[in-house]
Image (cartoon, rainbow, N blue to C red):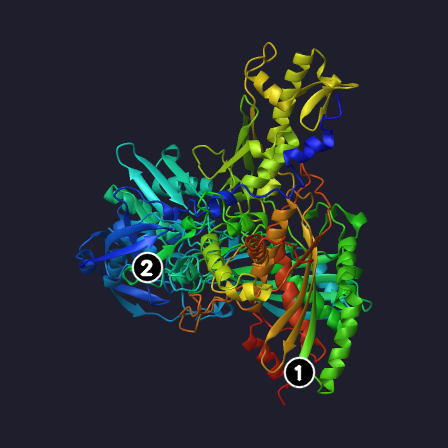
Amino acid sequence: MNDMTPTSAERAVKLEGMGCKRKRVEDIRFVQGKGNYVDDLKLPGMLYGDFNRSPHAHARIKKIDTKKAAAVPGVVAVITAETLKTVNLAWMPTLAGDVQMVLADGKVLFQNQEVAFVIAEDRYIAADAADLVEVEYEALPVNVDPLKAMAPNAPMIREDLKDKTDGSHGKRKHYNHIFSWQAGDKAATDAAFDKADVKIKEMIVYPRVHPCPLETCQCVASFDKIKGELTLWGTFQAPHVIRTVGSLISKIPEHKIHVIAPDIGGGFGNKVGAYPGYICAIVASIVTGVPVKWVEDRIENLSTTAFARDFYMDMEIAATKDGKVTAMRCYTIADHGAFDACANATKWPAGLFSIISGSYDFPAAHVLVDGVYTNKAPGGVAYRCSFRVTEAAYCIERAMDIMAQKLGMDPAEFRIKNLIRREQFPYTSAFGWQYDSGDYQTAMNKAMESVNYKKLRDEQKAKREAFKRGETRELMGIGVAFFTEIVGAGPSRACDILGIAMFDSAEIRIHPTGSGICRLGTKSQGQGHETTYAQIIATELGIAADNIMVEEGNTDTAPYGLGTYGSRSTPVSGAATAMACRKIKAKAQMIAAYMLEVHDDDLEWDVDRFRVKGNPERFKTMTELAWAAYHEVPPGMEPGLEAINYYDPPNFTFPFGAYICVLDVDVDTGTVKVRRFYALDDCGTRINPMIIEGQIHGGLTEAFGIAMGQEIHYDEDGNVTTASFMDYFLPTAVETPHWETDWTTTPSPHHPIGAKGVGESPNVGGVPCFSNAVNDAFAFLGSTHIQMPHDNWRTWTAAEKLGLHG
Amino acid sequence: MAKSHVAMKVNGKTIEALVEPRTLLIHFLRDQQNITGPHIGCETSHCGACTVDLDGKSVKSCTVFAVQANGADIRTIEGVANADGTLHALQEGFREMHGLQCGFCTPGMIVRAYRLLQENANPTEEEIRYGISGNLCRCTGYQNIVKAIQFAAAKINGVPFQEAAE
């Protein structure tokens, strides 16, 4: 070697592997307007579909007359439930084991429900004609309040289930009851409450919200009658699931369905499910023989596809006088809307809600969740969180503050006293989850030191005194949240969707010249998979990330996988990628040993090559080995250099973080000014710190939106009053606070590269942190809990109720 | 429906076409002209994904009829790159500063920033935040978009870009 030979460290840097702030591959096309989104697709002869929707929240359909609509020039067909019945598609199964109307069959159950589907030559004609479908309704009593759903005389939402006495998880208690699900030890928990020194109880509501990606849900269906094949382009976070469900519903053999998810303009859970628009577009293409495009508008998006949350959590905590928690219990009513189309792993009707004991060492805990039907849109997706994890984190973090207040303790001090200690990991929670790794105290201490927590509390104290003296009309709030997530669904023993185990996959092919392609069962919607998966491969195989193409979203070429949501891509497909690399590396090692005429064990790995132990100048690089794999393999070995891995994770991963928010509330206007927001995240091994930071910024902004203004609201007649950007709050650059990010690194012990997943933690931790800060501002006046969202009106109202307006 | 004749310049090229009077500019560009860079996020002029530069102003093309653009000079994201095909300072800045994730708002955001920097060559963070407040982004939280625009301003002004300390 001479001085010009790059060192191992220099070679490693050039690979742009794990830990590198690698610039994104995707950006080159996106910044030039050359992304390829579903609505960009234009096929010869393509028609457009649009819905006629119900103005009523609950009504019987007396008559549907499509004659006027069908007579509009340019209209090709009008489909109703009657049409769909001829192909047995008027109803479809949901991911939660329920059934859902594709088009209204006999009655409508929520406002804007799909009633008829018009297919026309352009989108304007389709919209015109949809308005001309004449529907005669007979209005029925409406219920949009889940707490009244199981009242004796509540309107019956689902007449089709009238005689169904068993739900998917036991007996139904009422005709509007969907399921009861519980976890933990009720007897031990009740006993702990009976002898508790201090108890708190609060109804904590997480309102209905919507993920609202900037691109709505859309698809193009193209059925080839000659071949009997369906190609479906769509905004699918889980393309393979769509193919399987599509095959089960349509009876088209699965190998004759080609599902393609091109670039997706954000998902956040909205694009996991199967919606009537997809089914109608497919049927329309089968009927007309040409491709049919369906594109949701924003009102349709906010009011019909995939709401999130809508959890009413009656939460209790028990503790000793000196502030040690002894038990928690929570009874929850979950509003699932008119059909149970909740996107959860099938065995978990309330998702992973039993992560509700959070980051604290609760000796006993119990939760019970009842799901109910109301006259609201179906859905129940995990909006930027793993299944129902954000509801759980919000509830426990709010309740911990309420208990600290009752005990007269500082909320941070109270948390520190109860955090699971480092030496307790792997830690089994009262609900039976095995938390893989954590170092909570270090994270909490770092967060508190970074913001100078003590000084903030001193400042707050002075400001409160000044407020009492009438010298200021501002209240300072400090929010603390320490969250633990459960992500990376998941181990097949625990998780499946309609019987399909929630593994995921990666297939890697290394080409003769040493570059390669990796295909996966996940699907990026902005997370930067094309960039980050290549970084895993770069580190594992010593091939520059720039020489790896990452491809997702085409079910014909990608290995089967369950898709991207619930922060599962890195924990599951990231693991699959590493494992596939290791198979390739093992083969490369055998080839290297053959070429260097040594035993396999005489070789060691060095960044991008195998070298002979003790003789580093004898080596073969991966590039050389790739070439050799195609012409010089050892006798008896198959040529080629590729591998596939289906990874069934042994456990979930448990990312965590400590967040602190400082804000000021103007009690006369209700306006809230966020002064500072500090987020410390521990997602285990960090693959691309730039992308992680971007994910945190985005998730915090969504959390800010949820905590401070978002709500899908219905009036008592079931009219959805927040179905456009006039009424549904999305933060702009002006309102959005400045974000400070930080991290600790506690790798997952069971994940091949130690990564835990990160995209959702800022939403999970951010919402309680904002809410705690607003609540903290008022706490010294005796207020215990103000419901979200903390918009100006509600905040002003809270001040009014406390008599602050004189 | 009777069609009207329109002629306009889009990204330096003159386009002539027949359109229905009710056709929105965004649909004219996307569906008739295959200029699919500008996107549709709301159809109510709130989100800004459809932003184009029309006669020197940032305009939401979902709220303008194609016939209103008759005679106009329009620039979309497809026309932002430098004449030699290299990326414009804004396009480079968005990539360098990680100012985009899903990419759906990006064309509108860059086209808006393109005009912003001509209105104000050296905007403060506050001016940038105000200046792009008609464009929604669901992924980035805006912080890196602000940095991307600052990066571009510095590059255009020929001064070194200095990231503000956290």
Where A434 falls versus A790 (above or below)? Answer: above
Tell me which residue sits at (35%, 57%) in the image. Answer: B73
Chain under numbered label 1: A
Placement of the C terminus of chain B among the 4 image quadrants = bottom right
Q: Which mark is residue A657?
A: none
From the image, tell me which residue sits under label 2: B72
Chain under numbered label 2: B
Kindly identify the amino acid type of the residue bearing the numbered disc 1: Arg
Q: Position of residue B85 (x, y in %)?
A: 45, 42
Q: Do the residues at pointers 2 and 1 share their chain? A: no
Q: CA distance from mark 2 to mark 1?
A: 51 Å
Kindly identify the amino acid type of the residue bearing the numbered disc 2: Ala
Where A613 falls versus A162 (above or below)? Answer: above
Furthest-front residue in this view:
B158
From the image, tell me which residue sits under label 1: A473
User: Toward the viewer: B68 or A318?
Assistant: B68
| Corner quadrant of residue A461 | bottom right
Element on which disc 2 rests: loop
